[in-house]
Image: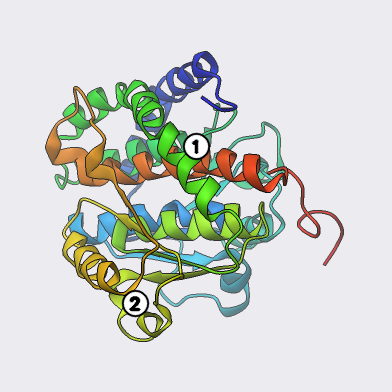
Amino acid sequence: MLKFNEKLYLEDGKATYQTRGLIEQIADEISEEGFNNIFFISVGGSISIMWPVQEMLKQMTTIPVYAEHAAEVVLTGHKQLSKESLIIMSSKSGDTKETVRAAEWCKENGYRVVSLVGTPDSPLETLSHWVIPNKAKDGVEFEYMALFMLMFRLLANRGEFPRYQDFADQLERLPENLVKAKQKFEPLADEIAKKYYNEPYNIWIGDGEMWGEVYLFAMCVLEEMQWIRTKTVSSSEFFHGTLELVENGVPVFLVKGEGVRRAIDERVENFCKQYTDKLVVFDTKDYELEGIDDAFRWILAPTISTALLVDRLAFHYEKYTGHDLDIRRYYRQFDY
């Protein structure tokens, strides 16, 4: 596979899973202390992987769950945010400007923060009450794994996820399954990138627990890393504006999940089949998760999507655009 080190990937998966004991210990400490709501606070790619988890929690727990942009919440505050809240933050670098400022603000107000941090001794680590180390060199799916273990252990302690033990045990098999998914998708990734890399305009659609995935790939990969113009819209909002832009010659990319909102995705798919000759559908159901119960597939669907898009498809776009994924004009290049 293009620019893929399977050995390193599986090592990263193993290292991530080995943090399970620490994550469960943290979750148990939080449960013992108690909390009355959950806040996800981050920016960019980090908050995009929190949105799917927020959507899942809205269907699984009676605890109120919120997601706030780090740069905004320090200005507006939030009347539901208190010392009884549990705040989740994430930053691979550990020094994302907006997230660090939000963490400082939380500490000033006595709010408890548990952070996923990819860089030891970074500012975010120093400011957090609990820290979950992100030991994987690359792979958004590994960040999902850590979040899943934390959040669903918390729910299990509340009696809201009784099959947590089964889920967490089976999660160990996820990385090897995702390698197989990547292998299956590889020729399709090349075909899609070759056909669409030079399009002047793209529409990306998804919903619910897949919306964060659509946002992440379109904004953080196509826009930030490839400078490709995209429009992102949820499946539920598509029929209230964006549908008027669909016609032959306009590429539409639909990311289908496996939860209850799949019915909305299928409505979009049926419409676009009629009105554009450039519809591409990414369906996580096309990829097997051997050794993992079907009941957990809707939860793991975002990990399949990110393995295919943020990894495989991104590198094939890079191949055809000739634009290095690491090159930025503005992001982190100077103060702004």
Instruction: Give the mark count.
Output: 2
Element on which disc 2 rests: helix
Label at residue 238: 2
- Tell me what residue is drawn at x 40 percent, y 73 percent: 248
Q: Which residue position holds label 1?
A: 312
- Image spot of residue 149 (x, y percent): 34, 35
| Amino acid found under the numbered disc labelled 1 | Arg
Res. 240 image quadrant: bottom left
Res. 301 image quadrant: top left
Q: Is residue 241 visible?
A: yes
Element on which disc 1 rests: helix
- Tell me what residue is drawn at x 67 percent, y 51 percent: 225
Along the line of sight, which residue is nearer the eye, 126 or 67?
Answer: 67
- Image spot of residue 241 (x, y percent): 38, 86
- Tell me what residue is drawn at x 48 percent, y 56 percent: 48
Relative vertical location of residue 9 with respect to residue 123 in this rendering, above or below:
above
- Most extreme residue toward the right is 334
Relative vertical location of residue 201 with respect to residue 87 in this rendering, above or below:
below
Label at residue 270: none
Earlier residue among tags 1 and 2:
2
- Tell me what residue is drawn at x 57 percent, y 60 percent: 219
Report crowding for label 1: few under 14, some 14 to 19, many 20 or more residues within 10 A (C-alpha): many
Q: Is residue 111 visible?
A: no
| Amino acid found under the numbered disc labelled 2 | Phe
